[in-house]
């Protein structure tokens, strides 16, 4: 089956046209059944969504072959299957989630005290409490909690499966308060943040590329029964090639409203999905649940993240926690995962007159520099000096 046959678009189309959007074409793609027998590592398929038991995944990924097999299945599930995976028990230690929740609540309290209100891309202003760049704010406020949280092997497993190495994490906290209205159904960054007029100027292959430059995820910071408004999804909709031109159309929104699924989550569960999947935060109909999710947007080394993050400042703030954890015998993988979540993992763009790739094709990355400092137990002042010199060379 060609891409054109799968998506309902002419296989020879170089540019997509919003006038070709058809709910019937979407229906032909999404009205299928997800068979869990096609996904041997999945525990179940609930409402067409694959659910994985992270205790089992941790056992399976203990060998290189097992890790690659699991990653292969996760990629197939998100690209060619339902488009999303629920990872039950992604954070088995609830105390780590609770510590980070406390930090997020303190950030929200600071915003309220300052009279600030963070908006939302796809919901009415004031419906949610939102913390932008929560990644950097957490690193600066609670570096020990950051290391324990982002050292998580499941976040790294899915991110590296979809994007490869040197990915960049950004994070936004979203709290949908009781009575908070649902978002409009949408697709996400990159092309999901462009108008239809601009999006259709990009060739069809760029529409396909957009989805693989980022990975969307969310960590549940409290139990999320359906009445609290967990995210709505339309499984398999990521395969509709015209979706970046279709999601604003009333007929597609109506179809989404009638056919979406909504799964409850427990605290510490995570969801990851292809950003081309039609989705929307749900309406919080509960009386007293402030539904908090840490929204993760993970970007390819070859793409551009949505948020500006001061990764040099983050690395300096986190470095004492890295060294202390290393001295305490924390596994190397945990530290490397946390460094991957915070430091710049890619060598480019840089100034090749001053930052020359001696001994290879690419200069040392910020993440490599931080890891070298951890293994050699530098003093914080030495790392600060070396990070600043590296940043200056890149200008």
Image (spheres, rainbow, N blue to C red):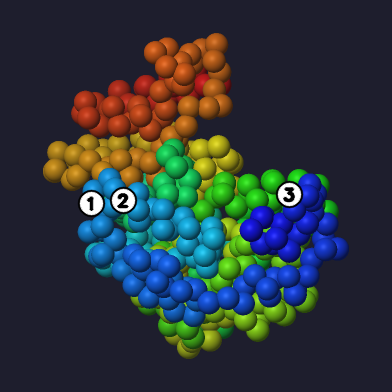
Q: Which residue is mark 3?
A: 204
Question: Which residue is nearer to you in this view: 110 or 25?
Answer: 25
Q: Is residue 129 above or below residue 209?
A: below
Q: Is residue 25 above or below residue 226?
A: above
**Is residue 229 placed above or below 167 in the rendered structure?**
below
Whichever of callouts 3 and 1 sits on the residue coming sooner in the sequence is: 1
Asked which quadrant contains residue 360, the reply is: top left
Picture disc at residue 295: none
Q: Which residue: 72% across, 66% down?
A: 247
Q: Residue 79's spot in the image, x, y percent?
A: 54, 58
Residue 305 placement (x, y as % from top left) = 56, 44
Relative horizontal placement of residue 64, taking residue 18 as reference (left or right): left
In this rendering, position of residue 160 left or right of residue 274 = left
Could you classify mark 2 by the number of other residues whose Cα lies within 10 Å: few (under 14), some (14-19), or many (20 or more)?
some
| Extreme-left residue of the structure | 328
Which residue is at 69% across, 46% downward? 206
Q: Earlier in the sequence, mark 2 or mark 3?
A: 2
| Helix, strand or loop for disc 2 | helix
Contact check, label 2 and label 1, Cβ < 8 Å? yes
Please state if 30 lies on the left or on the right of 356 as rendered. Answer: right
In the picture, the quarter occupied by the N terminus is: bottom right
The alpha-carbon separation of the residues under discs 2 and 1 comes to 7 Å
In primary-sequence order, the first of circles 2 and 1 is 1
Label 3 with label 1: CB-CB less than 8 Å: no
Q: Which residue is identified by label 2?
A: 67
């Amino acid at each position: 089956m060609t891409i054109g046959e799968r998506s309902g678009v002419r296989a020879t189309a170089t540019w997509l046209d919003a006038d070709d959007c058809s709910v019937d074409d979407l229906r032909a793609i999404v009205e299928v059944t997800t068979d869990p027998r096609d996904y041997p590592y999945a525990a179940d398929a609930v409402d067409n969504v694959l659910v994985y038991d992270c205790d089992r995944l941790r056992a399976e990924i203990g060998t290189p072959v097992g890790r690659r097999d699991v990653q292969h299945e996760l990629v197939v599930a998100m690209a060619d299957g339902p488009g999303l995976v629920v990872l039950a028990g992604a954070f088995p230690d609830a105390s780590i989630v609770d510590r980070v929740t406390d930090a997020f609540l303190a950030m929200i309290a600071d915003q309220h005290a300052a009279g600030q209100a963070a908006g939302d891309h796809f919901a009415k202003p004031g419906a949610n409490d939102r913390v932008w760049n929560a990644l950097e704010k957490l690193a600066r406020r609670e570096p020990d909690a950051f290391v324990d949280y982002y050292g998580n092997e499941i976040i790294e497993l899915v991110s590296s499966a979809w994007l490869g190495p040197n990915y960049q994490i950004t994070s936004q906290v979203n709290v949908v308060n009781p009575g908070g209205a649902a978002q409009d159904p949408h697709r996400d960054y990159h092309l999901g943040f462009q108008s239809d007029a601009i999006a259709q100027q990009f060739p069809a292959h760029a529409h396909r590329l957009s989805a693989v430059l980022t990975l969307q995820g969310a960590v549940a910071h409290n139990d999320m029964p359906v009445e609290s408004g967990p995210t709505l999804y339309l499984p398999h909709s990521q395969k509709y090639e015209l979706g970046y031109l279709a999601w604003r159309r009333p007929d597609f929104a109506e179809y989404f409203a009638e056919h979406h699924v909504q799964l409850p989550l427990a605290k510490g569960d995570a969801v990851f999905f292809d950003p081309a999947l039609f989705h929307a935060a749900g309406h919080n109909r509960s009386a007293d649940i402030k539904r908090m999710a840490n929204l993760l947007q993970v970007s390819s080394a070859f793409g551009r993240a949505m948020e500006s993050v001061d990764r040099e400042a983050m690395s300096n703030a986190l470095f004492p926690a890295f060294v202390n954890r290393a001295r305490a015998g924390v596994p190397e993988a945990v530290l490397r995962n946390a460094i991957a979540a915070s430091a710049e993992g890619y060598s480019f763009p840089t100034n090749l007159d001053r930052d020359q790739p001696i001994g290879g094709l690419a200069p040392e990355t910020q993440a490599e520099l931080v890891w070298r400092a951890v293994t050699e137990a530098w003093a914080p002042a030495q790392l600060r000096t070396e990070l600043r010199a590296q940043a200056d060379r890149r200008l």
